Image (spheres, rainbow, N blue to C red):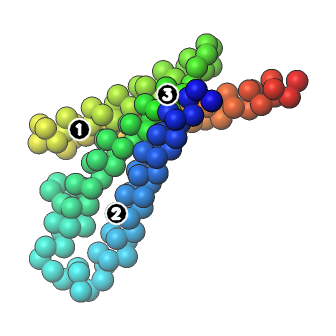
Amino acid sequence: MGRKSLALAGVAFMSMSAAVTCAVHFAILTLSSQPAFAAEPWARLVFSFKWPSIAYALDIPTWDVFFPLAALFAAATVHGTGLASVVRGLLFASAALAFLGLAGVALANMQVRNIGIIGYAVLFPIAAALLAKLFRQARSDGAA
């Protein structure tokens, strides 16, 4: 119960990530191919995932700010040793790498943003799978 507010903050930031990324990708998939938009000279600046574009600018805070905040709050809710310690470490590492992706903006080098991809596309899924295992263990321990 003492970590409920941390978990809730993590869910809120992950919800923000999901909402923004869904909106961006839905707009790209549905609008960018429509003749009314595709024929416009500014369409690349809106829908492209090449810097600079509005879609890319919305993607950056989603995955380099909201996502790592969600992972940090999630990490703060996981206490214990053994598997719990591994999960916590992976969540912290995932958040740190995702935050480091922001350096790409500061350096005007979007290749540096790829550091964040390791955080959210490699480390986080591993942490999530291990967290599910940790939850199963806790449930079976509570039932015993």
How many numbered marks does the figure carry?
Answer: 3
For label 2, the crowd category at 10 Å Cα-Cα, with few meaning under 14, some 14 to 19 and many 20 or more, is some
Does dot 2 land on a helix, a strand or a loop? helix
Horizontal and vertical percent for residue 24? Answer: 34, 63
Mark 3 vs mark 2: in front: 3
For badge 3, the amino acid type reads: Ala
Farthest residue in the bottom direction?
36
Quadrant of res 71: top left
Q: CA distance from mark 1 to mark 2?
A: 19 Å
Q: Which residue is mark 1?
A: 102
Q: Is residue 118 visible?
A: no
Q: Which residue is mark 2?
A: 24
Horizontal and vertical percent for residue 20? Answer: 37, 58
Horizontal and vertical percent for residue 2? Answer: 58, 26
Q: CA distance from mark 3 to mark 2?
A: 27 Å
49 or 106: which is nearer to us?
A: 106
For label 1, the crowd category at 10 Å Cα-Cα, with few meaning under 14, some 14 to 19 and many 20 or more, is many
Q: CA distance from mark 3 to mark 1?
A: 20 Å
30 on left or right of 81: left
Residue at point 19%, 39% (across, down): 104
Q: Which residue is mark 3?
A: 75
CB atoms of marks 3 and 2 within 8 Å: no
